[in-house]
Image: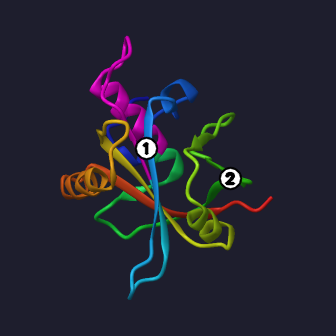
Amino acid sequence: MTTTDPALSFRAVPGPGFTAGCTVSTWLHAGALAPRIAYVLVAHAPARRPGESADSIEAGLMGMVDSMRLRPAAERVPIVGPRLLMRGPHVALDYGHPTYVMRLPTPGAEWRQHVAAGGLVCLTVGLDPVPPGAGPDAVEAYLDRTVAAHRAYMGATTRRAR
């Protein structure tokens, strides 16, 4: 049966070969009037491997979006359950694959303390390519651009208890 109803369609969750090409940023925002919130941004580097294309990368990212039940960034951010695994300084994201998790680059001590204490993490998946090594200004511009273009998906997550 084929359907065009997006509520009835699904995309495959990519494996570790795909996630190895992802660009991940983490940071902690501690505004004067807002509560502290940790952030994770997952995007993908531009296509560079054989068989990779902008379409295949977007399909892989959307598989992650679907499996984690993320919503468009312009909508209310849903709680998507505890998806972060922490062991010492190491943090991994359960992105919905039945066998694999995605290891995050080692976040700073304050970020880890916030999450270990049960703090919320805003998880964002951006569909547009972002080059590896993008600094804070480039990440902020990327988020502004992808959210405005409806090409970013978000959910709130926390640390998974053992």
Residue 112 position by quadrant? bottom right
Mark identifier at residue 8: 1
- Local crowd size for mark 2, using a 10 Å CA cut-off: few (<14), some (14–19), many (≥20): few
Residue 10 visible within the image: no
40 drawn magenta: no
Residue 114 position by quadrant? bottom right
* Callout 1: SS: helix
Above or below for 135 versus 22? below
Task: Please state if 114 lies on the left or on the right of 138 as rendered.
Answer: right
Q: Residue at x 32, y 23 (%)?
A: 47
- Local crowd size for mark 1, using a 10 Å CA cut-off: few (<14), some (14–19), many (≥20): few
* Callout 2: SS: loop
Judged from this view, the residue extending furthest toward the bottom is 33
Report which residue position mark 2 lands on: 89
In space, the residues marked 1 and 2 are separated at their CA atoms by: 39 Å
Residue closest to the eye, 141 or 97: 141
* On-image quarter of the N terminus: top left
Residue 123 visible within the image: yes
Whichever of callouts 1 and 2 sits on the residue coming sooner in the sequence is 1
Q: Residue at x 33, y 19 (%)?
A: 48
Judged from this view, the residue extending furthest toward the top is 50
Above or below for 142 versus 155? above
Q: Residue at x 52, y 35 (%)?
A: 13
What type is the residue that disc 2 sits on? Answer: Pro
Residue closest to the eye, 62 or 90: 90
Above or below for 49 versus 144? above
Image spot of residue 66 (x, y percent):
46, 46
- The residues colored magenta run 41-64
Image spot of residue 134 (x, y percent):
33, 44
What type is the residue that disc 1 sits on? Answer: Leu
